[in-house]
Amino acid sequence: MQKPIFRVFVNYSIKNSRGITRRPKTGTIDTFVLTNNLEEIKEDEVLHNRIFYLHKIKDKDKFKIEIKNIEVEGQYGETTDRF
């Protein structure tokens, strides 16, 4: 079964979970997801890992990602069934 692929722009901020950060790091990531449901995108572990990778954060437990805005641009195709 094929799944649709959506292109999204996500605005986010990264804060230290201990509350030490004076000014959080903010940014926008342009990526692809397999759903257009905003709540599922906010909780997507792959998206969080990409943001941590972009900021070179290795200890993920010490930081908290806050998703500020999600803009779904549109559907860009479907996944291919290989099996």
Image (cartoon, grey):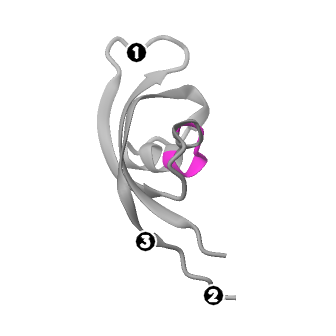
Q: Determine the residue positioned at 36% across, 56% down.
A: 74
In the displayed structure, 25 sits above or below 7; it is above
Q: What is the magenta range?
A: 42-47
Residue 46 spot, x, y in % from top left: 55, 52
Quarter of the view holding residue 7: bottom left
Q: Determine the residue positioned at 29% across, 35% down.
A: 27
In the displayed structure, 17 sits above or below 4; it is above
Circle 2 — which element? loop
Q: Main secondary structure of the magenta part?
A: helix
Q: Quadrant of the N terminus?
A: bottom right
Residue type indicated by callout 3: Gly
Q: Which label was assigned to residue 37? A: none
Q: Determine the residue positioned at 48% across, 21% down.
A: 16
**Residue 81 sits inside the magenta stretch:** no
Mark 2 and mark 3 lie on one chain; the one further toward the N terminus is 3
Residue type indicated by callout 2: Arg
Q: Quadrant of the C terminus?
A: bottom right
Q: Nearer the viewer, mark 3 or mark 1?
A: 3
Q: Nearer the viewer, residue 64 or 41?
A: 41
Q: Is residue 35 left or right of residue 82?
A: left
Q: Where does label 2 land, which residue?
A: 82
Residue 57 spot, x, y in % from top left: 46, 41
Circle 3 — which element? strand
Q: Which label was assigned to residue 21? A: 1
Residue 9 spot, x, y in % from top left: 33, 45
Q: Where does label 3 land, which residue?
A: 77
Q: Nearer the viewer, mark 2 or mark 3?
A: 3
Between the residue at mark 3 and the residue at mark 1, the CA separation in whole angstroms equals 40 Å
